[in-house]
Image: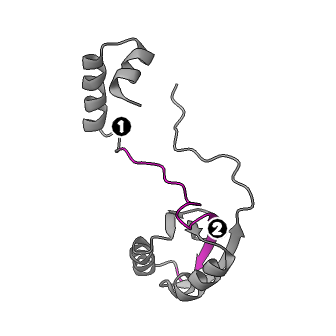
Amino acid sequence: MSNLKLAETVALSPTAVLSRVQRLTKDGYILGYEARLNPIRLDAGMTVFVEVLLDRTTPNVFEAFKAAVQVHGEIQECHMVAGGFDYLLKTRIADMGAYRDFAGTVLWQLPGVRETRTYAVMEEVKNTTHIKLD
């Protein structure tokens, strides 16, 4: 949304809105801006979530795993979670054949991986980066 459109929406002057947006950015509330790309047009139309269980839960294994996932563009998100496994990954890939290749050459080769569970997305019902504000 342009600064002018935002100013109209919140009934403030463009100068006041720009000042507030700059302050929110400086204070760390706004982390940045990015374009939302169409994964289907970019041959990454399949979303796959993967549960990862590590063979050991020691600081060096965690650090090695975290460093390794950073270098693979197919891994969009990596979250350490509480529960029956250690990490939840969100991956984007072209299709199931490409995922099979990725699993064998990358995923199962990540440091400390003992077991994975794969969940291929059949339908994306909601996808947003919005955070509810009161």
- Please tell me which residue lies in front, 68 or 7: 7
According to the picture, the residue beneath numbered tag 2 turns out to be: 48
Query: Residue 11 at x, y = what percent?
Result: 40, 11
- The residue at the point 64 percent across, 66 percent down is 46
**Circles 2 and 1: CB atoms closer than 8 Å:** no
Q: Tell how many labels.
A: 2
From the viewer's perspective, is residue 77 above or below residue 9?
below
**Callout 2: few (<14), some (14-19), or many (20+) C-alpha neighbours within 10 Å?**
many
Q: Is residue 85 magenta?
A: no
According to the picture, the residue beneath numbered tag 1 turns out to be: 29
Residue 53 quadrant: bottom right
Would residue 84 appear left or right of 63 to someone viewing this image? Answer: right
- Please tell me which residue lies in front, 42 or 73: 42
Would residue 36 appear left or right of 54 to someone viewing this image? Answer: left
Looking at the magenta stretch, what is its main secondary structure?
A: loop
In the rendered image, which quarter contains the N terminus? top left
Q: Which residues are magenta?
A: 33-56
Asked if one can make out residue 55 in the rendered structure from this viewpoint, the answer is no
Query: Residue 27 at x, y = what percent?
Result: 28, 36
- Disc 2 residue type? Val
- Label 1 sits on a secondary structure element that is loop
- The residue at the point 70 percent across, 62 percent down is 121
Residue 113 quadrant: bottom right
- Disc 1 residue type? Tyr
Q: Of the residues under marks 2 and 1, which one precedes in the sequence? A: 1
